[in-house]
Each structure stands twice: as C-alpha cells, then as structure tokens.
Image (cartoon, rainbow, N blue to C red):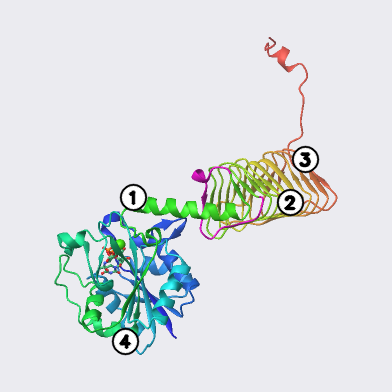
Amino acid sequence: MYKCAIILAAGQGKRIKSTVPKVLHKVAGKEMVNHVIDTIRNAEVDDINVIIGKGADLVREKTADRNVSYSLQEEQLGTGHAVKCSKEFLRDKEGVVAIFTGDAPLITSETVKKLIDTHVSDKNSATLLTSLIDNPTGYGRIVRSNNNVEKIVEHKDCSAEELKINEINAGMYCFDIKSLVDALDKLSNNNAQGEYYLTDVIGIFKNEDKKIGAVITEFEQTIGVNSRVELATVEKILRDKINRYHMDNGVTIIDPNGTYIGIDVVIGQDTIVYPGNYLEGHTTIGENCVLYPNSRINNSTIGNDVEIQSSVIIDSIVGNETTVGPFAYIRPESKIGNNVRIGDFVEIKKSTIDDNTKVSHLTYIGDAEVGKNCNFGCGTVVVNYDGKDKHKTIIGDNAFIGCNTNLVSPVEVKDNTYIAAGSTITKEVPEGSLAIARAKQTNIAGWVDKKGLKK
Ligand code: UD1
Ligand code: CA
C-alpha cells in the first residue's frame, strides 16, 4: 500500500519566544523537524511533505538535503488548515497518510511503523497515537465511549469532566487519504482558539461511522515542545538515551550527565569519553580512542587509537594513532594522517598533514599540503594570506622546519630539507638543502663595558 507522510511545521511557536521558527530549534544537535523527517524516513514511508509557513525559507534551507517536498501555509489558521494546504501533494493519491507535528522529536521509527501497521491491518480510516499522563495540561484529550475513540477535545475547549481525562493526543495520526481530504472541507473554526483543528476530523469520522483506532505509547515519545523548558526536558531525555546506546555498545562515558553526543554520531568500542565533550553532526569516532575533557568535534571522522584533549575539530578527518591538543583548533577541510601529533596551541586550516608528522606547539598551518615525517618547530607560521588573496604552501616528506619559521606562500619546501630557526622563507627550498633566511649574527665585543652598563 502507498504510504506518505505530512509534517506540520508552519507555526512560529509563540510560546518558545524566538525569531527562529520553533521546529528549527535543535535537540541533540539536530533541528526538531529534521529528527521527525529522519524518523519517518526510517519507517519506510514513500513521500514526505512538510507544511511550511512562518520562516518558510529558513525551514526549506535547513531541510534542503532531506529529499522532502513542501506545501506553503501562508496564514496559520490551525493544524487542520495546515493539512488542507497539502491538497496538491495529496491530489490523486490513494493509501495512507501519516501526519506528524514538527515539534515532537522523540518519536521513534518503531512507533511510527507500529502506528502505520496497525492502521493498515485493522483497516481503519483513522488511527491515533495517544499516551497516558498524570498532568495532561495543554494537550488534546481523547474522549472514548465503550472504549472506542469518539473525538478529540482541545485543552482550551474541554469541559470540567473532559479536563480530567488523562489520555492525550500525541498529534500523530494515520488517515485514509480520500476520507481525510473529504473531511478537511467540513472543518469549522468554531472553537476557543478560532482555529481549524485537525483533531476535529476524528469526530467527523465518528459521525460517518468510519473506523477509528488508537495506539497507546509511552508519553516520553510524544512530548511536544512548546517552550524552552520543554526543549531542555526533551534534550535531557534524548541525551540520556543516546549515551545509554553508546555505553551498551562498549563505549565508556565517565559522566553521562556532562557528555553531549549528537544523534548521528558513531563511536567505536573501547573508546573513553571524558566529561565536557560535545560531539556533533555526522561525526565518527573510531575504536580505542580517548577523548579527554572539553572538546567540540563537529562533522568529523576520527580514526582508531586517537587521543584528543580540549580541542575543536570541525569538518575534518583525523587518522589513526594521532594525538590532538590540548588547545588545538582543526578547521574545516583539514585531513590529518596517521600517527601525527597536533599539539598545544596549533591551528590547522584547510590543510593536509601526512603520516608521522609532528606539529607540537604554537603553530599555524593554513592552505598547505604537508608530507610525511616532517617536524615543525615551535612558533612556525604559514603566511597564507597577503592581505588580498590566500596562497598555497607545499611541503614534501622529511622536512625539518626550525622554530619560529615563516613560510610566505605561495612557496614550496621539497623533500629531505632543513630550515634554520627564525627563517622567513619566500623561495623554494630545493631537495636535500638547508635554508637559512635570517640576518647574520654580529657580536660587538666589549659593548656593555663601553656603554657603562655592567652591573
Ligand atoms: C496539537 C493538537 C493537540 C495535541 C498536541 C500534541 C491540534 C488542534 N491540537 O496541539 O491535540 O495534543 O498537538 O503535541 O492539532 N502548525 C502549523 N500550522 C498551523 C498551526 C500549527 O503548521 O496553523 C504546526 C506547528 O508548527 C506545530 C504543530 O503544527 O509543529 C502543532 O501545533 P501547536 O500549535 O504546537 O499545537 P498544540 O497546541 O500543541
Ligand atoms: Ca505543540
């Protein structure tokens, strides 16, 4: 059977008090709407349509790599109106549409699958996801009679009796496409909020004797984020879950409360993560690594047996048995080889550093290609910028760069070379040679005495 999904993401989210649309606020390093998209995608849905409105361009931009289509809801007149805006997307389709809100990121693919499977196997016209909670304030209530779902009543429209119901609407549903499209035309906005509620479709189906089912799931998965406090609540739940997953896979996390691992991060067995690490984006950490405290690693691939401490690594690759930090900064598009040392106060930008090279301290390398077995003395600077353009530096294998060298780009240092400390290199250093590029030392004998400065 054909299965598609709609994600509601057009609201601003007044209660979150932000200039950024609510669904773009991040949980575990990923926008809420992208959590929902990825989860639905994993549940093997054919097409996904995202309803956008407030901050539409930004939502499009942040979801651009996810192969979804969009429908525009120019005015936010309610969740029912939002779904109506996907008319074009639903046109001539037959089968199941699953509808989710973009502000409930904890739902799992298993639950989405279960919802769709139940809907299909029970031959329902609508199937809701619900959960049971002690304090249902704010949520739509599930009204049942003889155990069958009759309707959903929004919190603000509830009678005193209905307010006591503790089965809530998760805002996640499956519908038969044709029946849904028909019912959307029958919605009215005659309610406390003056909005067209998607939830009213259930009551309409009931009146038409259509079959309605419900799948009850744990509340945690259905939490909707409306405020910053709820954002932090959801963040904590997801972080704990992610940390537990890695620990179950053989990763030591010394203090899970102080370790922040994004949802798409992969970590190999026997790696040890100290507190204060932020691992974000599509980052992969190999096996047997030690991540000492306080690093931020974003969209990077780290090999096996690597040690990193108090450093920042962004959009880069680090090879096996390499050590980084403390206080190193590896900027985008860098590729660090195996058994390399990137030491303290070293900045690498858009450069390749090949195997067994040591850059131990206080060095800047930008727009450079560095070979194998090189040694950078303390305080080396690649002078890659002339005030107007960036230029490239190429260093071969086995180069020994003396302390406090400037490499004025574009420049090339060939294999098996030495550069004397304090040199400012502006010309090629040919293979096998020693380059000295500094003023010769002169000693003026007896100068201190002559000046009467002797102490
Ligand atoms: C909604 C449900 C409620 C449920 C709760 C679960 C309705 C009427 N109510 O309430 O029963 O318990 O979710 O979290 O559906 N949106 C649009 N266009 C609009 C309005 C909203 O795209 O015109 C989007 C929002 O961006 C958001 C989602 O729909 O992602 C839910 O909207 P929200 O205002 O948060 O609904 P709730 O009041 O939480
Ligand atoms: Ca909500």
**For residue 453, which quarter of the picture?**
top right
Q: Residue at x 23, y 84 (%)?
A: 208
The residues tagged by marks 1 and 4 sit, at their Cα atoms, a distance apart of 39 Å
- Residue hosting label 2: 427
Left or right? Give the position of 323 relative to 397: left
Q: Residues within 10 Å of mark 1 (few under 14, many from 20)?
A: few
Q: Are marks 1 and 2 in contact (CB under 8 Å)?
A: no
Expressed as whole percent of the image width and height from the top left, the position of residue 98 reads 38, 76
Whichever of labels 3 and 4 marks the residue nearer the N terminus, that label is 4
Find residue 219 and report its horizontal and vertical position in percent: 37, 59
Q: Earlier in the sequence, mark 1 or mark 3?
A: 1
- Mark 3 or mark 2, earlier in chain: 3
Residue type at tag 2 = Lys
Kindly state the secondary structure of the residue where label 2 is placed: loop
Q: Is residue 41 left or right of residue 403?
A: left
- Amino acid tagged 4: Lys
Callout 1 touching callout 4 (CB < 8 Å): no
Q: Is residue 20 magenta?
A: no
Residue position for label 3: 420
